[in-house]
Image: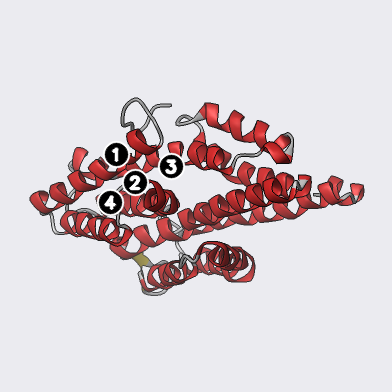
Amino acid sequence: MVTALADGSPEALVDAEIAVYRGIVEALRSYVGAPEGGAEDPYTPWDDAHCLWSGALQERAVAAEGWTGEDIVGPVDAAFQAGHDGFVGEPPAGLDEWMVYPAKQVTEKSQYRVIHRHVIHYATLARDDVDALAARRALRWFEVFSHRLEGRNDAGITVITDMLSGDPAAIDPAVIVRELNVAFAMRTRGYASASLDAGELGVPNGYKAASEGEIYNTLLYPDMTAQLPGFAQASHEQLWADYKQGLRDDDFAAAEAASDALVEALCSYQVDVLGLAECKSGSD
């Protein structure tokens, strides 16, 4: 940031601006993870994260809502409140793990949803206006969460980086969406059955894993809705709710039925829309 500010060029200032956001995102991730990690005083790091959200990152979510029509801010605000409500007593405080664990996933992973929308928005703007600065902005936002593609779509990192570093007129936002969503579809597919596969029913960790998959799926909804025949987001969201409830109730049959339906839709998306040779949940 210091180097960029000393440079003073528009390109360098874009770098500095997004470096600030990158640092804030990483700080938020650290803070919301502290209670689950055993912090004696969970209130302080959680409230610090909430300050970062309301003071800086929420404005980026509001911008993304304006581009896509989604409700991003509401679920994050609710998750911060739920997490806080899940702390029991004065420090050193206990945790209601059923509340805090999933709240952590929503507050953290929703930032990736916001970043995803920023990458696509600025890539499209760069292409439409032949705007190299918008392309640089898209690239820098991508770099904030490119590590999320590692091990699942390493080739896609190169494709996106090269495209956003080249001629803005040659940018194809659909290709960027595809490369991003290959990785996130793999992550989501894994969480759609991981708790069942591990036998984690009736325990907070299983519920947490399902909550993580549920929030990762939000990154995919615009493309699933546009590209997957017969897909209904509301019905798919209900499947996640049913899956989580089955896990919480230790109801294997209910959890399995919802999981099977989730996996079917996510695998159809991977193969029929993204063009993967087979449905995957982990490997590149």
Neighbor class of circle 4 (other Cα within 10 Å; few <14, some 14-19, many 20+) is: few
Q: Quadrant of the C terminus?
A: top left
Q: Label 3, on which residue? A: 184
- Residue 92 or residue 29, whichever sits in front: 29
Real-space Cα separation, disc 4 to disc 1, in angstroms: 11 Å
Q: Do the residues bearing badges 2 and 1 touch, measured as CB atoms within 8 Å?
A: yes
Q: Comparing marks 4 and 3, which lies closer to the viewer?
A: 4
In the image, what residue occupies the spot 58% across and 71% down? 54
Q: Do the residues bearing badges 4 and 3 touch, measured as CB atoms within 8 Å?
A: no
Q: Label 2, on which residue? A: 228
Q: In screen coordinates, is 43 left or right of 130?
A: left
Q: Earlier in the sequence, mark 3 or mark 2?
A: 3
Residue type at numbered disc 3:
Phe
Residue type at numbered disc 4:
Gly
Q: Is residue 30 visible?
A: no
Mark number, residue 230: 4
Q: Earlier in the sequence, mark 2 or mark 1?
A: 2
Q: Label 1, on which residue? A: 268
